[in-house]
Image (cartoon, grey):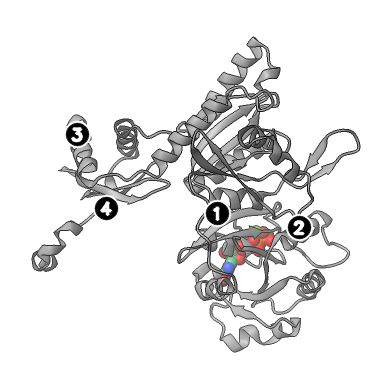
Amino acid sequence: MIPVIALIGRPNVGKSTLFNVFTRSRDALVANEPGLTRDRQYGVGERADRTFIVIDTGGLTGERETLDELMARQTRIAIDEADEVLLMVDARDGLTEGDRQIAEMVRKSGKACRIVVNKADGLSPEQAQAEFFALGFEHLHIVAAAHRKGTTSLLDELLARFPPAVGAVPGADGPVVAVIGRPNVGKSTLINRLAGEERVVAYDQPGTTRDTIAVPFERRGRRYTLIDTAGVRRRGKVHETVEKFSVIKALEAIERAQVAILVTDAQEGLTDQDLTLLGYVLDAGRALVIAVNKWDGLDADRREHVRQALARRLEFAGFARRHFISARHGTGVGELLASVDRAHASATRDLNTRLLTDLLEEAVFRHNPPLHHGRRIKLRYAHQGGRNPPVIVVHGNQTRHLPAAYLRYLTNFYIGKLGLEGTPLRIELKTGSNPYAGKKRTKTRKK
Ligand SMILES: Nc1nc2c(ncn2[C@@H]2O[C@H](COP(=O)(O)OP(=O)(O)OP(=O)(O)O)[C@@H](O)[C@H]2O)c(=O)[nH]1
Ligand SMILES: [Mg+2]
């Protein structure tokens, strides 16, 4: 299980700033204006081989009369989803009635909680912390999020409480595939189609929102593990089942998988939620296959329209194969799985240094990098820097000045020549001495 941390507190205490430090993203908006964050925000962070999920929430005033019910609900959901809560307070404001109210809210939830005293820059630790012990929580951390002070040790203490990460899915061999998508797009139908109908039974059982179900199956002599992210299903008033959507589940599944299948609904088109999920997959660098489900219900005109709309709107995830399927009838599901195989193979492939360097030379020969201040940018050799996603590290001179367009050219060149499919490829540029020259150490050192 991946630890989930919720950031809560009054407006403007620095929750989004800390969120950005933890996730190293610039996603959460930070502004010197209380009440900026309105929705819950989810992000994934990494620290020394550990992965964790962070939830940013909108600030709560904590004052009964003005307490924004919507924000309060958001905060309650975040507390509920979290394994540990960080209640942030502002060292410069000192302890306020709002802080007390929010602390009370956490206490009632029974969740583990730490006080994070922010904006402690320029204050002595004694000054900063003294009054906040009155909130009655044992753990108190003093940080200056905007200056990244104290944030690493906070994270280390926090993560130490959780058992170390368990790679992917314990006991899984073969590709681990996350099946993600909005409620009722047909995730479970697809999983049943792939894994066999007897699996159906499992899904109607109540569980907590955090339960993800790993479904092992075999097809044509190959083993797979599907991660089902379908929410807890409740029988609705009428016939249908209502599915509760959990971002945490999707994030967890994406982290644990090598390939994601994003299931969308052809009849409803792409929604913001689809694009949010897609964004999570791209951030994680996972291999991706897109399943456009419920294709059976569309006439020829409509199909053409949907095809074009998707091609346009999914251009930024162009590496992902799109399959138009009917999970209910089984149409297109075999081809979908074949794409999953190819995406998995591409994403986890070992790339030979010799080959990568030869290809680099070929790419440069065909199309030279430009000059920078009259000196040619040189790309000399390449080697693999990671898998899933594949990372190619390219060494050369003045690589900082390599234009984005050239990097795109190089990326596409590698993708084409290596025959990579269904996975993003990352290229890292490095300027400096050749690490393989390490044997002749004295020479390179002296430069
Ligand atoms: N001096 C100082 N300022 C900080 C620190 N951390 C955050 N700030 C500033 O405090 C302001 C509010 O920060 P946010 O991260 O947006 O606060 P928030 O809690 O997310 O606010 P809401 O989303 O409105 O609830 C910004 O101007 C930050 O730059 C810090 O450690 N020291
Ligand atoms: Mg915020």
Q: In front of the other: label 4 or label 3? A: 3
Q: Any atom of ligand 1 within 8 Å of the CB at mark 2?
A: no
Indicate the position of residue 23 as horizontal and vertical percent values: 53, 58
Q: Position of residue 152 (x, y in %)?
A: 50, 72
- Is the C terminus in the top left, top right, bottom left or bottom right quadrant? bottom left
436 with respect to 409 (left or right): left
The residue where tag 1 is placed is 169
Q: Residue at x 41, y 39 (%)?
A: 345
For label 2, the residue is: 77
Secondary-structure class at tag 1: loop
* Label 1 packing within 10 angstroms: few (<14), some (14-19), many (20+): some
Earlier sequence position, callout 1 versus callout 4: 1
**Which is closer to the viewer, label 4 or label 2?**
2
Question: Does 216 sit above or below residue 20?
Answer: above
The structure residue drawn at horizontal position 61% and vertical position 27%, both measured from the top left corner, is: 292
Type of amino acid under label 3: Glu
Distance (Cα) linking label 1 and label 2: 27 Å
Q: CA distance from mark 3 to mark 1?
A: 40 Å
First in sequence, mark 1 or 2: give its number: 2
Mark 3 sits near ligand 1, with its Cβ under 8 Å away: no
Name the residue beneath numbered marker 4.
Answer: 430
